[in-house]
Structures are given as structure tokens and as C-alpha cells.
Image (cartoon, rainbow, N blue to C red):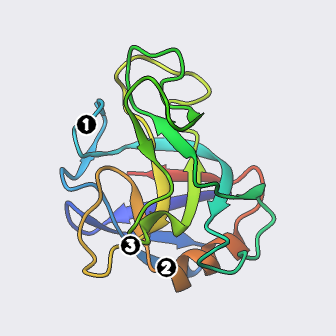
Amino acid sequence: MILRSICASATNGQLRIGDRSFPCQLGHAGRSARKYEGDGATPIGTWPIMGVYYRADRIARPKTLLPIKPLRYDQGWCDEPLDRNYNQPVQLPYRASCESLWRDDHAYDLIVVLDYNISRRAINLGSAIFMHLSHDNLRPTAGCLAFTETDLRMILQLLKPGHLITVR
């Protein structure tokens, strides 16, 4: 089964799963078939879903058949293209540039990791492409797909291991 994000505008889209549709925010630079680190674009393509993280101190465990783990306060994601752990989870503090997954805002209270540039990494093609919670004002992301908590919880109930996400 392929899930499609069909974009209505540069930064807004719809994730369709069967006959269900979920609005989402995309990267502030729109979509790109030539994604690179820090460009603010959501990459165009199809990726497997790797797993889910959630903030157990803030939200209840979502119902899903996907692999799921609670986030730890010391988890980060390396975004330094020349580091050996580029676009991989790391433990903080970390010697190279990385993003903390334990954030003050609520965007990463629920994260779905997409296999964009992870299994077959290439330098500078972008990192930390997730499905996560939208900001309160529904502003565009830095390249991810963002949903309301209600919608992302419903999406997680519909997803199964082996499903793919397609952005076009």
C-alpha cells in the first residue's frame, strides 16, 4: 500500500490513506526532487516507515502496529553531513551538529521516522525527515510532514509495517 501526500500548495498537502484524507504542513521551501541539507524543502519520493517515537511524559502511547519507543531526554539526530553518524539517532551531548529530539515545543512529542537518506545515506542530501506534530499556528516545517495530534494518531492506527509514504 502506498500512502500519498498530494500537495495543494507549496507548503500544504493532504496525506491520503484509502478513502481517508489528512491535511499536513510541508517544508517552508515547498517540495524538492533535489533535497539537500538545510534547504527547508520536503523531499519528493517514496520511503518506508522505520518506526515511531513518543514523549511518554507528555502524551499517551499511540495505538500502532509499527515499531514504537518512548523518547529519552538525551536523544538527538545528527545533521552534520561529514559526520559518520549523519542522519542517524545519537545520544546527547554529541560531538557534531545535531538536533535534540527532546524539544520544549510539542512538535516532536510524536515522531514517525521515514527512511529518507537513512538506510542508503549520501552526504548532504538531508536529514531528520519525519512525520511529526504540527505547531499550534500550523506553520510550515523545516522539511518534514506535520499533522495535528488527532490526525497523526489516526494515521498511526492505519499504518502497518511495510507501508510506504510517497510525497509528490
Q: Residue drawn at (47%, 68%), measured in percent from left and top?
A: 15
Q: Which quarter shows the N terminus?
A: bottom right
Say which label, 3 or 1, has the lower sequence index: 1
Depth check: 107 or 116 in front? 107
Say if mark 3 contacts mark 1, CB within 8 Å: no
Q: Position of residue 120 (x, y in %)?
A: 57, 22
- Sequence-earlier tag: 1 or 2: 2
Distance CA(mark 3)–CA(mark 2)? 16 Å
- The residue depicted at 25 percent of the width and 36 percent of the height is 38
Which residue position holds label 2? 21
Q: Is residue 59 left or right of residue 151?
A: right
Foreground of the two, 49 or 134: 134
Where residue 10 appears, as percent x and y from the top left, is 20, 60
Q: Residue furthest bottom?
A: 150
Mark 3, secondary structure of its residue: loop
Amino acid residing under circle 1: Gly
Q: Which residue is mark 3?
A: 134
- Distance between the alpha carbons at the discs numbered 3 and 1: 19 Å
Q: Quadrant of residue 58?
A: bottom right
User: Is residue 65 found left or right of 86 in the rendered image?
Assistant: right
Q: Circle 1 is placed at which residue position? A: 38
The amino acid sitting under disc 2 is Ser
Question: Residue drawn at (41%, 24%), measured in percent from left and top?
Answer: 96
Disc 1 crowd, CA 10 A, few/some/many (<14, 14-19, 20+): few
